[in-house]
Structure formats: structure tokens, C-alpha cells
Amino acid sequence: MTGPRGRDGNDQKSVDPSRVTTTPKPCRTYLRGEDRREHILDCALEIFATKGFHEASIADVCARARIARGTLYQYFGDKRDLLSALVDRIVSRIIDAIQQWRPVELPRDVRWTHEDNVAYIETRCSQIMTVAFADADTASVILRIARGTGFVRESIAKIDQHVIALIEADMRAGMKRGVLRSFDPHMVAEFIVGGIEKIVLTALDAERPLDVPRIAREIAELLSSGFIPAEPQRAAAGE
């Protein structure tokens, strides 16, 4: 007795369902409106930080977000538009956080000590690193990709402008109060911000975690004490 025949007239063999293998389809996330856009930007941040802007593709972002290309193009025109939107989001979040920082307060009836100065600078440096370089992906986009990509460089410059202006204002207040010596506050503020960025970039290149407390403390001690000990020991005669 023969089994059922197919359209070509050949016998059809029965198939054991347990031996049939199927390729699972990717599970897509279902979001709406602004949530979908934010999700795409989150995925773009990860892809750009991992592969770099030039090596990454729209297909990479779509695969990470589990969406079709057409869905992405509902929100972004192309890869440049996607990076621009990502950088604008990063800049907006950082500036919003910076604007919440309280300016330095120097009570007139309290003596500002060396320890106070170290603690203040340490706090400011920690704030900068925590907000601007909250995670490795964000730091990579800010310091590597965005600064090396002309069409978003101006947006990234806004972060430096806000941070430098805040530090400069703090130092001017200290000089006015008489607890800091006279110097060029804008130049020193640029030195602080540029030094922090270099330290963060070196940590990224070496793929090591950023030790924020240690870095902030070292910067604070250097700016408050310099390189010379407070009471240098004179060499004995004949040494």
C-alpha cells in the first residue's frame, strides 16, 4: 500500500514533527512614537560606540533595535541624521544637568581653608566626569566620533562652553572673595576641562574603567597645592 502522492505523482514520505527544525524569527519590540525614537537612539549609541560612525551601518542599528529599515527612516533621514540626533540628545542631557549645579558659595564669616578648596575642586571634577562621561559608550561618542565628525562638532562644543563657563565663574567668585590669587580664570578652566577629557580618552583607548574619585582627588590636590610641598625641607649643607 502506497502513501499519498504529491502533485508530481511521487510518494510523499511522512515526516516526524520532532525532527523538523525552524529558525526563530527575531522578536521585535513594539513601541510607539517618542519611545520608539528613543529606543533607536539607544541602539545607535551602542553601535556607533562599538564600531565607529564610518564602519557602522543603518542595517547594524536596525538589527540591534529589531526593526525594519523603513521604521528607522520614519524618524531619521540617514546615518548622518541619526548621529546628529544622538549627539543633540547627549548635549541636551548634559547641559540640563550642568544647569542644575549650584554655584560656589563663599560665606564671608567663614575662613576658606586648603581643605575646603580641595573638596570643592574634587566635587566639581567628579560632577563633570559623572555627567559628561557617564558610561563608556557616551564618552566614546563625545570624545572620538563627534569631535572627529565635522557636522556635529559644533554641537559637542556647547558642552565645553557650559562647563568652562561654570568653572570660570566659580574661580572669579573665589578671586573676588580673596581666597584665590589673581590668574586668568578662562585659561585655567580650559586647562581643567581639557585635562579631564585627555584622561578619559586615555582610559577608553586602554579599555580600563574610569576611576572618577581618584582622578578628581589628584586634580584637586594639584590645583590646590601645585608640585611643591607646603613646607619644603631645605637640603642640609654638604648634601
Image (tube, rainbow, N blue to C red):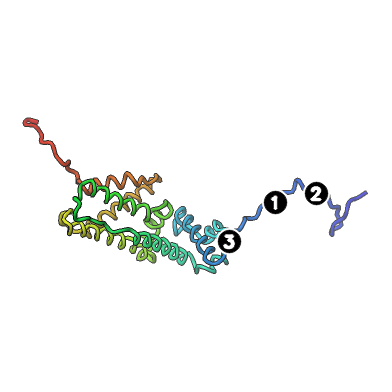
Mark 1 or mark 3: whose residue is earlier in sequence: 1
Q: Amino acid at mark 2?
A: Val
Task: Quickly name the residue at label 1.
Answer: 22
Residue 226 x %, y %: 19, 46
Going by the numbered disc 1, the residue's amino acid type is: Thr
> Mark 3 is on which residue type?
Ile
Task: Report which residue position mark 3 lands on.
Answer: 67
Residue 134 located left or right of residue 117:
right
Q: Residues within 10 Å of mark 3 (few under 14, many from 20)?
A: some
Q: Is 123 left or right of 6, judged from the image as shown?
A: left
Label 3 sits on a secondary structure element that is loop
Furthest residue toward front: 109
Say which residue label 2 marks: 15
Q: Give residue 230's position: percent from left, percent from top.
A: 16, 42
Left or right of 33? Residue 177 is: left
Q: Position of residue 41 (x, y in %)?
A: 49, 61
* Mark 1 element type: loop
Residue displayed at 24% across by 58% down: 170
- Distance, label 1 to label 3, CA atoms, is 21 Å
Spatial CA span between label 2 and label 1: 14 Å
Displayed quadrant of residue 36:
bottom right
Who is closer to the viewer here, 106 or 40?
Answer: 106
Badge number at residue 44: none
Dot 2 or dot 1: first in sequence order is 2
